[in-house]
Structure formats: structure tokens, C-alpha cells
Image (spheres, grey):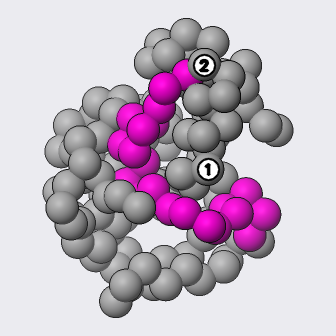
Amino acid sequence: MAVAADRGHHFSKPIRDRIVLVEGHGVEGDAHAGAFVRHRYLARRQPRMDNLRQVHLIPSELFASLLKAGFRVGAGDLGENITTAGLNLERLPLGTLVELGPATIELTGLRTPCVLIDRFRTGTMSQRSD
């Protein structure tokens, strides 16, 4: 559906016409790319931890459910690099390989929602479907 990247550590990422996925690195030019963890909270505590969050995916279907609850959220708004359609990402097992055009990525885990989501749109965290 959409791709996004940002060199800075901002909550939302601007939509791009294209992104380049680099094996073992992530999205070229994105703040979260690299072999070691780039999430600011984790990097302060364990800077040499493997980066399992090189590419963030979010299903576009999440935006529709949030809209029903009164929250207008679009591609890139929640910091994802790739907005998918028709993939139930939460139900796919870890290790699943997803083909994205010429690239294949491995799902390594679910993104842990944090307090920044509520700073983006107050009340959004209460819409989580754990």
C-alpha cells in the first residue's frame, strides 16, 4: 500500500515513492536501519543488541479499525516503513518470509506499542487488540 522512511528519530515517517531494503541492515537511509538496535530506549541500555526491528510493517486494515473508533491514522503515521494490505501480520508465525517485490523479509516479532502512540493521537493506545 505504501512505503515510508525517515533519517531522523521522529514518530511518524514521510511517505516515499520507493524504499531500498538492504539485507542485514533494513531500509536504506532510515533511522532504524543497522545491524545493532536503533530504538533509542533500547540502544541506551544494550547498544550491541542485534537489531530485529530493521523494517517495521503495519497492516492498513488497522487504520480502518482505528477510524471506526474516531482516530484518523494513515500510512507512515505510526512510524512504519511498509504499510501492507491483506496480510494478517499478527497471525503469521515468527520466521515467516514475506516477499515484497524483489525483496524477501523475515518476520522477527511484533512491534511493542509505546506511550508515544498516545502522544501522537490521545486515546489510541486504548484501541490495542492484544
- Residue wearing tag 1: 61
Q: In the rendered view, would you say 67 is above or below 90?
A: above
Quadrant housing residue 18: bottom left
Q: Amino acid at mark 2?
A: Gly
Label 2 SS: loop
Q: In the rendered view, would you say 106 is above or below 67?
A: below
Residue 84 point in image, percent of width and height: 50, 62
Q: Which mark is residue 70?
A: 2
Question: Residue visible at 32% across and 69% down?
Answer: 25
Q: Residue furthest bottom?
A: 102
Q: Amino acid at mark 1?
A: Glu
Distance Cα–Cα, label 2 vs label 1: 15 Å
* Magenta stretch: dominant secondary structure: loop
Quadrant housing residue 130: top right
Quadrant housing residue 1: bottom left
Residue 102 visible (yes or no): yes
Mark found first going from the N terminus, 2 or 1: 1
Label 1 SS: helix
Q: In the rendered view, would you say 73 is above or below 85?
A: above
* Proximity of marks 2 and 1: CB atoms separated by less than 8 Å: no
Residue 34 visible (yes or no): no
Q: Mark 2, residues whose alpha carbon is within 10 Å: few (<14), some, or many (≥20)?
A: few
Looking at the image, residue 26 sits to the left or right of residue 7; the answer is: right
Question: Residue visible at 72% across and 26% down?
Answer: 127
Question: Residue visible at 36% across and 43% down?
Answer: 76
